[in-house]
Amino acid sequence: MNNYMAYQKAMTDRIGSSSTETLMVMLFENAITKLKQADERFKMQQRIPALEAVNKTIKIVDALMEHVNTSEGGDVAVKLVQLYHYTIHELSLAVLPKEDPVLHLKNALAVLESLLQAWKGLEKKQNEERS
């Protein structure tokens, strides 16, 4: 088995045995990593790789938004969807030629990092309850 296949199997095993909270942390960490890559690429004037990283971030946030249950989640779920919409809006502005991508990426990053911390708190609480 080559290194890539071993990595892929390890990730599949990790995902398959992970709690919802852990999966959410993984998704947010991935989105934040892509967002930081986009920021670096924009700063280095590498527009195409920056756009690709922004697009991947949008896909992750869109997937997160699709799984919010607004009918059962009440006001919290509605506010979460609003945060996701805001994040996607900021990411969409970041790719426009006349906009300042760094500013819009910073705004999106602030939201994603706040949500990541919330999910990490939930993950920690769940792990403590299991122990």
Image: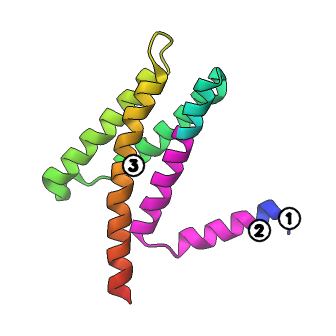
> Which residue sits at x=26%, y=55%?
69
Residue at the left extreme of this rendering: 75
- Residue at x 50%, y 46% (from the top left corner): 31
Q: Residue at the spot x=37%, y=87% of the render?
A: 130
Whether residue 66 is visible: no
Quarter of the image holding residue 87? top left
Note whether residue 119 is visible. Answer: yes
Q: Residue 41 occupies which quadrant of the picture?
A: top right
Q: Name the residue under label 1.
A: 2
Picture coordinates of residue 34 (x, y %)?
Answer: 56, 42
Q: Mark 3 points at which residue?
A: 113
N-term mark: 2 or 3:
2
Q: Magenta residues, as a range?
A: 7-35
Mark 1 touches mark 2? (CB < 8 Å): yes
Front of the two marks 2 and 3: 3
Q: Name the residue beneath numbered marker 2.
A: 6
Q: Give x and y (percent) for residue 110.
A: 37, 41
